[in-house]
Image: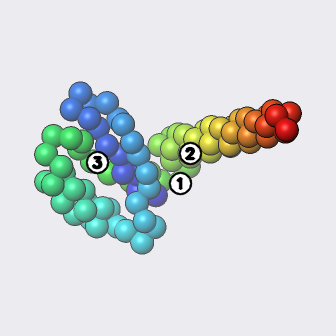
Amino acid sequence: MIIVYYRDADGKIVRAHTAPEDWTMETAQERIDQFNSEQGNKATAYALQAEDGSIEAYLYQKAQERAKWDKDALQEAISAIEDALDTVRGLEV
């Protein structure tokens, strides 16, 4: 898997995603070079070839799982709030 990640001006990683599965490392680098030339100083993109079973692949997958859990928890909280609001609105009548 190819992981594309972005660093801000301070060098902090601010975002990451995987490249399309059909991209080679050369294709990724070409796209990254184009992106970096168009961005100026906003963010700089990099690519990392992460082999299956590598620490990089593991950490990326765990981060994606964590993001999904956070989204699921957020959706559950929104649903609970909407249910409570519907209940309170029902009391107004």
* Depth check, front residue: 90 or 27: 90
Q: Which callout, 3 or 1, points at the residue further toward the start of the chain?
A: 3
* Depth check, front residue: 40 or 30: 40
The residue tagged with tag 3: helix, strand or loop? strand
Q: CA distance from mark 1 to mark 2?
A: 15 Å
Residue named by callout 2 = 64
Q: Is residue 63 left or right of residue 20?
A: right
Label pair 2/3, CB-CB below 8 angstroms: no
Question: Could you tell me residue 83's position as x and y percent?
Answer: 79, 40
Residue named by callout 1 = 52
Quadrant of image for the C terminus? top right
Q: Is residue 59 left or right of residue 83?
A: left
Q: Which callout, 1 or 2, points at the residue further toward the start of the chain?
A: 1
Question: Could you tell me residue 87's position as x and y percent?
Answer: 84, 36
Q: CA distance from mark 3 to mark 1?
A: 19 Å
Q: Nearer the viewer, mark 1 or mark 2?
A: 2
Instruction: Tell me if I can see residue 22 in this picture.
Output: yes
Residue named by callout 3 = 46
Crowd tier of the residue under label 1, counting other residues whose Cα lies within 10 Å: few below 14, some 14–19, many 20 or above: few
* Depth check, front residue: 76 or 46: 76
